Amino acid sequence: MKRFAIPFITAILFFSLTFIPTQSIPSDKAGWIEYQFQRLTLEERIGQLFMVAAYSNQGEKHHEFIENLIQRYNIGGLIFFQGDPISQAKLTNQYQLKAKTPLLLAIDAEWGLGMRLTNTISYPRQMTLGAIQDHQLIYDMGAEIARQLKLLGIHVNFAPVIDINNNPDNPGIGNRAFGDGKGSVISKGLAYIQGLQDNGILAVAKHFPGIGDASKDPHHELPTIPYDITRLESIELYPFRKAIRANVGGIMVSHIYLPAYEKTPNRAASLSSHIVTQLLKNKLGFKGLIFTDALNMKAVSKYYQPGEVDLLALQAGNDILLFPEDVPKAIALIKSAIEQGKLAKEVVEEKVKKILAVKYQMDLHQWKSIEIDGLYEQLNTPQAQVLKQKLFEQAITLVANQDDLIPITKLNKHKIASLSIIKQPITAEAQKSINQQNTVATNKPSTIFGQFLSQYAPVAHYTLNRTSLDVNMLQQLADELENYSLVIVGLHDLAGNRANKFGLQPELLSFLTKLQHANTKVLIVVFGSVYSLELFQNMQHLIAAYQDDPIAEQVVPQIIFGALPAVGNLPVSIPNAWKSEWGIRTKSIKRLGYALPEAVQMDSRILQGIDKIVEDAILEEVMPGCQVLIARNGKIVFEKAYGYHTYAKKNPVTNTTLYDIASITKVVGPLQAIMYLVSQNKLDITQKVSTYLPELSATNKKNITIKSILAHQAGLLDYGITRSILFQKDSKLSKKLFSNYPSASYPNRIGTELYAPHLLKELMWDLYINSPIKEKDKTKKPSKTHGYHYNDLSFHIMHRLIEKLLQQPMEIFLANKFYQSLGAALVGYNPLERISLQQIAPTAECDFFRTTPIHGIVHDPQAAICGGVAGNAGLFSNAHDLAVILQMNLQGGYYGGKRYLKKKVIKQFTSHAFKNNRRGLGWDKPELPTKLDSKHKSNTSLYASADTYGHLGFTGTAAWVDPKYNLVYIILSNRTYPTQENNKLAEQNIRIKLQDIVYQALQNMEQ
């Protein structure tokens, strides 16, 4: 796409699409124009001057009305308003076929088609765009809107608004303007104009000569701008003068009274020849199409009758009469004025030919009908959505940030609550609670904003409906929120203006101010008018999000927690507070963010193939349900939950469902601690393990190194508890080793109503250290290697080693040092100690010594007997929090503003440790190509790079990191439910099939 040159001097040269006077039109155009002109009667020529309002949602009677105007009066064009894109496209085809002269079609799409049509994209309002410093993005938006408009057969966009909004009380413009600085307004306006016109759409700058300082809304009454010409030329006219020099194709003249130019009382600019002809055309030299603002507005319709106002507008110098109230009457009056000599016939003829010239340039001389098939998809492409997210990311503005709270770094130091203040309840659950007491605390947030806050930290969610506030209720809520160190307030559904404080009651404002005190920090996020910031100038932490939009609600939490930087600047000055261009910059601290696949060069259409594979697998009872997550370039681009916890289909899997991740525990549990110890120079993996665990000195394990243990090349064999130890001679569990009730003697829960003593864990350790080892491979020269043999014992030994060196339980260290700090609080051992059973997927119905469901308790028997905490298994997680840990490793040990591990240590551990061994240190890696044959299948996608590392899990899990492609891929399932004998997941190669799709979705992937 063509790059937009930022400097203004370059900007004024950039239009390739120029609308030139009739006499300069080349002969090929001239013939078509003359032909069309000569076909028309005087009444039909006059009809070309009208652009009538059309709707695609008002039924057949309205459609017949429009068709009558087209066929009987040969109106020149239509401005489309509310409706849907498919209906509008069909009507467009129908109307064009019935038109004697092709119709010029327009729309008010200031922020895209979503301004008028359902099921289309709404880009940020212009005030939001005013906060953006990268004008290339605004150009790109203009280009994308142009692409969409052309799909619908539209030729004219009544955008951008280039009024300078220097009156915060302006009721008619507000968030439709870019801001209050004339330089910023025109630079952004020109970017938008160029984006439209470079891509074949006529841009119409509005509302000439500038209504940013109006105190009345011309939709309802006539505003007055009382300033002298010097002031008007310096401020109001400035952006229009620049736009004209840059060859903007159209200008809309507003209904505003300027006594400096027009002395006739109540004569709007749109009806003033002094303004339209003498100022706009003669003095400023504008030669493009001049449109009136809508002629049904009260600013003109209050003073002039239908028909009369149209004639005055034409006499003033306008080319196209927009939204006329009575076309037949207006045509009759204009024709009469011509016949009476009050309006020169040549004026009308010149305007008609000017309009026809534009129609030719819009390719209406070779009109083609709109293709309906696939239209919705073409209007709503992923690339178009990616652009919208980029715009919001660049706009959100950090206004106040005392003590540099944002981005939040030390997650484990904060106890966080969110408070969503809304005008209407958003969810059914919130509705029920709010109906009862107007406020609700729930683990399920009521807004998208709250949902995304919970992606970064444990957050208690409150919802407050401000439609009916009670002082006692507010006090009760304040008392509850005092228990939190940080309260993040989202203000939604703002309405009104400064006069009514945007609908925020005094008692609510007082409540928010009092929330902020020494022990509780308060962050206010305003999803509404930027001018409402004036109400919060005493708040220590404040973010301007500008408008209620789902994308804005997703972006702000990413800025709060440092996945994205804050880069926006205020587009306007806030009375008594901040000047325009104010904005506090922050940097990303490299937490996982969220984006569409196309934002990271992945094809979302290909990723949709994941759905079918998973849904078919669930249907075939490969697994009851699962979670799949894909992240690339630090962005989660795919995160989905499928199916149910069990085949009974009672409890659906969500993105917060916990799974037993089995052997993935090895790499995101003890291995993280081992890498930490190496990073801290507290462990040398080249040393014998007996150096650190003297109890191994008198065993057959005295000479094995830690490095060989981690690579599963130490000759260790799986050896643990046996039935003869667990069971009595009568085949019942040993009463000495197990109890049906918890007690000081039997503290470790290993099953439903089954508990074990600590001594069982020590018994296991004795069995481990005295277990046999594999003989060395005598075929190798020299005979110094046992060869690769995967086993669990390696990580039982690592568990013991970690606790010896750290002098604390491994699970406590991991929780404090890694999981809580990272924002991966759902990861942990023994989840029932902190998580509801309903949030955990059951792993199996039973095993060889547990006869009741294994639910919330580790599936691995050895880990269970160890009290649920072991080196080989025991961790539970959801895909999201697991991805956080993997992303930290992918980023070289850095995440969320903190270094956890040394980059060189991660590189060492994720590289091949020994020749002819696919393993890294602890990490699994893709099978070596030389080992692949009909009997030895790959453990990863064959597309995965040799740098890939991760692990599989027995319960039906996989987690892989590919540094070459900056990629994280996770699938978590409970394929072992109801029985581990179900091995369809491996037999059907589901995990690798899904991983193949991930790589196939990569665009421009190396072959």
Image (cartoon, grey):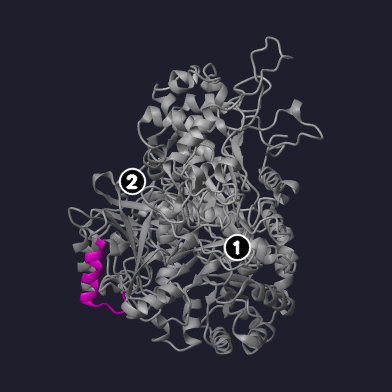
- Kindly identify which numbered label has been placed on residue 412: 2
What type is the residue that disc 1 sits on?
Tyr
The quadrant holding residue 939 is top right
Q: Residue at x 28, y 72 (%)?
A: 504
In the image, 213: left or right of 506?
A: right
Q: Residue at x 56, y 70 (%)?
A: 107
SS type, badge 1? loop
Q: Looking at the picture, how far across and down is residue 55, in whole percent?
A: 59, 80
Q: Which residues are magenta?
A: 466-481
Q: Judge by depth and name the residue closer to the eye, 546 or 839.
A: 839
Instruction: Check if mark 2's residue and mark 1's residue have beta carbons within 8 Å.
Output: no
Q: Judge by depth and name the residue closer to the eye, 352 or 713.
A: 713
In the image, 397: left or right of 989?
A: left
Foreground disc of the pair 2, 1: 1
Q: Mark 1 packing: few (<14 Cα in 10 Å), some, or many (20+)?
A: many
Is 474 a magenta residue? yes
Q: Mark 2 packing: few (<14 Cα in 10 Å), some, or many (20+)?
A: some
Q: Residue at x 34, y 80 (%)?
A: 436
Farthest residue in the right direction?
Answer: 934
Q: Looking at the picture, how far across and down is residue 630, in whole percent?
A: 58, 47
Query: Which quarter of the rendered picture does the C terminus lie within?
Result: top right
Q: Is residue 850 visible?
A: yes
Q: What residue is pinned by disc 1?
A: 644
Is 389 a magenta residue? no
Q: Is residue 202 above or below residue 330?
A: above
